[in-house]
Image: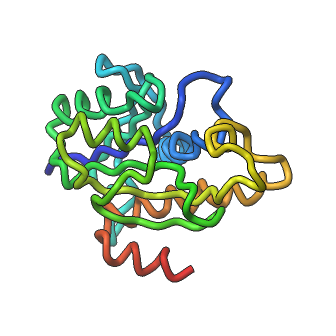
Amino acid sequence: MDPWLVVGLGNPGPKYAGHRHNIGAMVIAELAEQAGASAKEHKGRAWVSEVRLGTMPGGAPGPRAILAQPMTYMNVSGGPVAALVRFYKVPLEQVIVVHDELDIDFGAIKLKRGGGEGGHNGLRSISQSLGTKDYLRVRLGIGRPPGRQDPADYVLSDFPSRDRVDVELLIGDGADAVTDLVHTGLETTQGRFHSR
């Protein structure tokens, strides 16, 4: 059975850890914690954990998945993603990218396969490196910046402390969305999360 590759986008290092732009990486950390797995450095320039995602009906372990966070900056995420696809022989239809999305209200989650990158440099890099836009995306809503704040400054700033509980909920929901997507497919998972 071919593995899934679940990539959480973000920038590396503690300086960026709490930024809105790193919400995808936060979901990967949550999934690894749920599976009791720790990340190891991979030669493809990513931190990876090999896990079973969730459990199947009857209690059998869920599908095999590679959880990954590129060790590169967001704008050049594509190289590590393509390297992991080759190394683990992951079919492109089983690549899931988890990322922040300005054009979705804070706390909402939308899923899709393919489509444009909406100005997201991490997605653009992945599309170029994979040679296709036709991969799955779990899009985590961070909302638009207030007033005239530059979107680049907004995504590269921490979530405010007043939003801590909502951020934790978004991370948990993002992890659930990934697990549902692997277990039940895109349309069923869209039905569950888009109706919220």
Position above or below: 30 against 184? above
Q: Is residue 143 left or right of residue 33?
A: right
> In percent of the image, x 44 and y 23: which residue is there?
71
Give me the residue at 16% from left, 32% from top. 86
Residue that appears at 65% across and 57% down: 144
Would you identify the image quadrant in which residue 68 lies? Answer: top left
On screen, residue 20 above or below 191: above
Among all residues in the image, which is located at the extreme top? 43
Q: Is residue 171 above or below residue 24?
A: below
Residue ID at (73%, 40%): 158
Where is residue 108 drawn, in percent x and y? 58, 67
Residue 34 seen in the current view = no
Residue 4: give x, y in percent of width and height: 26, 48
Is 135 positioned to the left or the right of 32 in the image?
left
Q: Is residue 91 left or right of residue 157?
A: left
Q: Position of residue 147 (x, y in %)?
A: 78, 55
Q: Is residue 129 visible?
A: yes
* Scheme of colours in the image: rainbow
Residue 126 at x, y percent in the picture:
31, 39
Which quarter of the image is occupied by the C terminus?
A: bottom right
Query: Quarter of the image holding residue 155?
Result: top right
Q: Closest to the observer: 149 or 93? A: 149
Q: Nearer the viewer, residue 178 or 55?
A: 178
In this view, which residue lies farthest toward the front?
148
User: Looking at the image, how many numbered discs can be counted on the residues?
Assistant: 0
